[in-house]
Every structure is written in structure tokens, then in C-alpha cells.
Image (cartoon, rainbow, N blue to C red):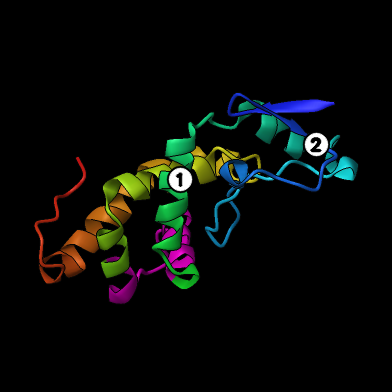
């Protein structure tokens, strides 16, 4: 049985996953989409992610993969934790990394991560908190980036 992802038919039992479909968010902010293994095909989380995952074009997936490669796991986790628990502090180092990443990358990564079954229950809190995290980083290190960085409205 094949599952449709990004308008492509993928054999869920195949071990070969096309490069342009290798995108699925995990906690460490590495992004890749994986076709569920046969033993996981019936899991509610896998079914939810396949059915409700945002459908991205190859160009959009490439953009998000490039974004994910521009951030370190350490800073990705720090920013993520700040969005779900505002008492968690984002270091200046990670704020610089976030601002250099840019608003579009930050928003794209946040949207794909919080569209997953694992994080959907906290998306309504975390996605709006993304702006607060961004603005905090602008205040902390925005003047050190070397290009004008604007606040989120």
C-alpha cells in the first residue's frame, strides 16, 4: 500500500526513501520525513502525521532542510525549550544563531515541528511564543548581528 506525501507515491514498505521526502521534525530539530516502518504504520501518531502533515513542495522542503542545517542542536533545543517554557533562558550565542537564521527559517521550522502529533498539543502556546523568543533575542543581541533585525509584531 502506498502513502501519498507531497504528491508522490511512496511505498511504505520500501527501505529506499527519496531524498526530497527525507523530512520529519524531531526534538533535536533535524528535519526529515520518514515513511513509517511496517510495524509502525498503524500507530496513531504515524497516521496523524501522514494525514495532517503540511504538504510542502520540493523547493519548500529544501529550504527547511537548509534552515535546519544552519542551526546547532544545542541552540535548537534552547529555543524550543524557551518557546514551551518561558522561564528557560536563550543564551546570547543561541540568540545570535537564531537571528542569523532569519524570521522565515525560524517560522518554517516552528510550523513543521508543531504540526507533528508529538507537539500538536502545545502548538497553540508555543507558536505565538515564537515571537516573544525572537523579540527577546533582538533585544539581547540584535545590535551585534551587523544587519538591521526587526521585532516581530
Residue numbers of the magenta segment: 75-95
Residue 88 spot, x, y in % from top left: 42, 67
Q: Residues within 10 Å of mark 2 (few under 14, many from 20)?
A: some
Image spot of residue 138 (x, y percent): 19, 60
- Quadrant in the picture for residue 82: bottom left
Q: Is residue 34 left or right of residue 143?
A: right
- Label 1 Cα crowd, 10 Å radius (few <14 / some 14-19 / many 20+): some
The residue wearing badge 1 is 62
Q: Is residue 132 left or right of residue 82?
A: left
Looking at the image, can residue 99 be seen?
A: yes
Asked whether 86 falls inside the magenta stretch, the response is yes
Q: Secondary structure at mark 1?
A: helix
Relative side of 19 to 151, left or right: right
Q: Nearer the viewer, residue 107 or 86?
A: 107
Q: Which mark is residue 12?
A: 2
Q: Earlier in the sequence, mark 1 or mark 2?
A: 2
User: Is 30 above or below relative to 57?
Assistant: below
State the residue lying farthest toward the right: 39
Q: Main secondary structure of the magenta part?
A: helix
Residue at x 45%, y 57% (from the top left corner):
68
Amino acid at each position: 500500500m502506498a502513502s501519498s506525501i507531497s504528491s508522490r507515491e511512496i511505498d511504505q514498505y520500501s527501505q529506499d526513501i527519496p531524498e526530497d521526502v527525507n523530512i520529519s521534525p524531531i526534538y533535536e530539530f533535524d528535519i526529515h520525513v520518514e515513511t513509517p516502518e511496517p510495524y509502525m504504520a498503524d500507530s496513531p501518531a504515524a497516521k496523524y502525521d501522514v494525514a495532517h502533515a503540511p504538504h510542502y513542495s520540493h523547493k519548500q522542503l529544501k529550504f527547511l532542510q537548509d534552515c535546519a542545517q544552519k542551526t546547532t542542536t544545542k541552540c535548537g533545543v534552547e529555543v524550543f525549550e524557551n518557546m514551551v517554557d518561558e522561564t528557560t533562558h536563550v543564551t546570547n550565542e543561541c540568540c545570535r544563531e537564531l537571528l542569523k537564521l532569519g524570521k522565515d527559517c525560524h517560522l518554517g521550522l516552528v510550523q513543521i515541528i508543531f504540526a507533528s502529533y508529538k507537539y500538536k498539543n502545545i502548538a497553540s502556546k508555543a507558536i505565538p511564543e515564537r515571537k516573544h523568543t525572537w523579540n527577546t533575542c533582538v533585544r539581547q543581541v540584535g545590535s551585534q548581528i551587523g544587519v538591521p533585525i526587526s521585532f516581530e509584531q
